[in-house]
Image (cartoon, grey):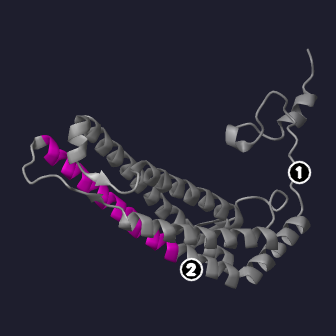
């Protein structure tokens, strides 16, 4: 059950993390099919390449942009998990203890700003990948090799368009999440201060002393805790 706004944002951020996996999958597919298309073109020689398809923008640059966008989305997901924590069914878990990492206005503002910047990046990528296409200037009479290259180019176009749609979705998602972060910023900071106060006031658990050296104490392993007391009463014959 979502008991606070921080747990609500953590649950939504978990969904964002799952959707981010799709960016890695599509970027990998785009890199593979683009590399295959270039290899098919290089096998035909210079005269064949003149008659083959022309690509207005280098596909290698587009592959790098796709992979780098996916890597950045993964980094932001990890950073957001550290800031917001993890919401599992029925219970909220902070990613780091209060003495290791504490939510501050600076860290929260940096997280919200990174969401805005990444939303702008995905918007630019959506436009670039949406306009990416392979223009076919070959003649109508194609042999089997030309037909295979045409099919490969069509797959590249479709993958690029799919990545463009995903970037548009990411733009809306990250921009909306940044609005939620800035709207709930005061509540998030107050909950973080309250958790730090509770952690400071809660008594620390002391480790139980094992009175039976060489044995594992506890009922779980069938060793009684009174063993250490009774062993001293055994008389040496």
For the point 85% across and 70% down, which residue is it?
Answer: 198
> Magenta stretch: dominant SS?
helix
Quadrant assignment, res 200:
bottom right
Give the Cα distance between marks 2 and 1. 45 Å
Give the residues in magenta.
Answer: 145-172
Give whichever of 86, 175 is nearer the camera: 175
Q: Is residue 19 magenta?
A: no
Find residue 206 and name its label.
1
Q: Residue at 53%, 62% (x, y): give it.
A: 17
In reply to whether residue 161 is colored magenta, the answer given is yes
Using the image as rendered, state which of residue 138 and residue 166 is in the foreground. Answer: 138
The residue wearing badge 2 is: 176
Image coordinates for residue 144, horizontal then vertical, percent:
10, 42
State yes or no: discs 2 and 1 in contact (Cβ < 8 Å): no
Q: Quadrant of residue 222?
A: top right
Location of residue 21 with respect to 16 vertically, above or below: above
Quadrant of the rendered structure where residue 231 is?
Answer: top right
Please, what secondary structure does the residue beneath circle 1 have?
Answer: loop
């Amino acid at each position: 059950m979502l008991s606070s706004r921080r747990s609500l944002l953590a649950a939504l951020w978990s969904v964002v993390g799952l959707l981010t996996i799709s960016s890695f999958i599509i970027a990998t597919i785009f890199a593979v099919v683009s590399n295959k298309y270039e290899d098919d073109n290089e096998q035909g020689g210079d005269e064949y390449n003149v008659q083959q398809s022309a690509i207005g923008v280098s596909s290698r640059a587009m592959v790098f942009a796709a992979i780098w966008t996916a890597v950045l989305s993964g980094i932001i997901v990890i950073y957001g998990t550290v800031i917001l924590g993890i919401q599992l069914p029925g219970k909220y878990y902070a990613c780091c203890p209060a003495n290791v990492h504490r939510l501050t206005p600076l860290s929260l503002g940096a997280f919200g700003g990174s969401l805005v910047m990444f939303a702008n990046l995905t918007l630019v990528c959506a436009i670039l990948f949406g306009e990416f296409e392979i223009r076919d200037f070959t003649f109508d009479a194609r042999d089997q090799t030309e037909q295979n290259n045409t099919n490969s180019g069509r797959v590249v176009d479709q993958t690029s368009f799919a990545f463009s749609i995903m970037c548009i979705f990411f733009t809306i998602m990250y921009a909306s999440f940044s609005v939620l972060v800035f709207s709930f910023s005061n509540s998030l900071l107050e909950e973080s201060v309250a958790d730090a106060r509770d952690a400071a006031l809660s008594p620390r658990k002391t480790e139980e002393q094992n009175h039976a050296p060489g044995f594992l104490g506890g009922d779980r392993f069938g060793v009684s805790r009174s063993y250490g007391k009774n062993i001293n009463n055994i008389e040496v014959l």
